[in-house]
Amino acid sequence: MFYLITLKSRSEVLFYFGALQLILALLFLLLSYTTTVQVAGVNAWFKPFKFAASIGILSLTVAWLLGYLHPMREKGIVEWGLVISLGLEIIYIAWRAYRGEASHFNVSTPFNAIMYGLMAAGATFATLMVGIVAFRFFAQPFPELHPSYLLAIRVGLVLFVIFSFQGFAMGSRMAHTVGAADGGPGIPILNWSTIAGDLRIAHFMGMHALQILPLLAVFLIKSTKGMAVTIAVYALVCLFILTQALKGEPLLKRPSPKSQTDVPR
């Protein structure tokens, strides 16, 4: 409860927006049990569920980080920039799911192409808002923060921006799968491909470094050297996952069915 009160005091706007997104994520997950409609081979409501959960986590994370930035003239711009850009994005994604249509890479009509372009512009704008927070964290000292924690925040912000812009690699291909068509076999809910490369995995890992690295610094890794090593390993893992996807190789391979000769007699 103490952390929720503190979080709300740091950014009331993002606190309520993030909480709303998490509630929507739960609603979308429940809706997935009410329909068999699929988009790209998966339940239509899985995509809005994933995006709402991710937007909620990002909003609450940025709200927490804003509490360290005093004073910050751009605070209102960052808060409302994220709310408007990401709020419109989740509305559009949910609307497409309701209609049983794809929200991403859908340029089948001029209207769809315009909306897809606007969604991409909104995601870019949201990334720039996080970029402002990153700039402020590098531009001023934070003597009150433990060095390993501060390092984790700074690098987490940088990795978020880098791998957020990695989304352009998917946009330029008009697909997230490499070596197969989108919508093939994948792991449950996330649907990361188990038969080909999937650019979404590195995208996910890099962007959520913003939560993973600081949490490691708080609960597990207390030394700056240890955090530096952890960051190096994490970044290399993200790079490996991205490289593997670009080569068309799945991170989690689908187990091949046993042949008749493998059946015990």
Image (tube, grey):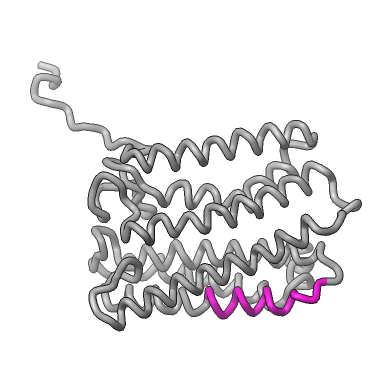
Q: How far across and how far down the image is residue 44, in percent?
A: 30, 67
Q: How far across and how far down the image is residue 133, in percent?
A: 71, 64
Q: Quadrant of residue 115?
A: bottom left
Q: Quadrant of residue 223?
A: top right
Most frequent secondary structure within the magenta stretch: helix
Which residue is depicted at the point 32% across and 61% down? 174
Residue 119 located within the stretch drawn in magenta: no
In the rendered image, the vertical position of residue 11 relative to residue 202, given as above or below: below
Residue in the foreground of this view, choosing between 78 and 172: 172
Residue in the foreground of this view, choosing between 51 and 24: 51
Identify the image quadrant of the N terminus.
bottom right
Residue in the foreground of this view, choosing between 102 and 140: 140
Which residue is depicted at the point 59% across and 62% down? 57
Q: How far across and how far down the image is residue 27, in percent?
A: 44, 71
Residue range in magenta is 72-86
Task: Judge left or right: residue 154 versus residue 189.
Answer: right
Task: Judge left or right: residue 136 versus residue 193.
Answer: right
In the rendered image, the vertical position of residue 18 relative to residue 196, given as above or below: below
Q: How far across and how far down the image is residue 146, in percent?
A: 84, 45
Residue 83 located within the stretch drawn in magenta: yes
Identify the image quadrant of the C terminus.
top left
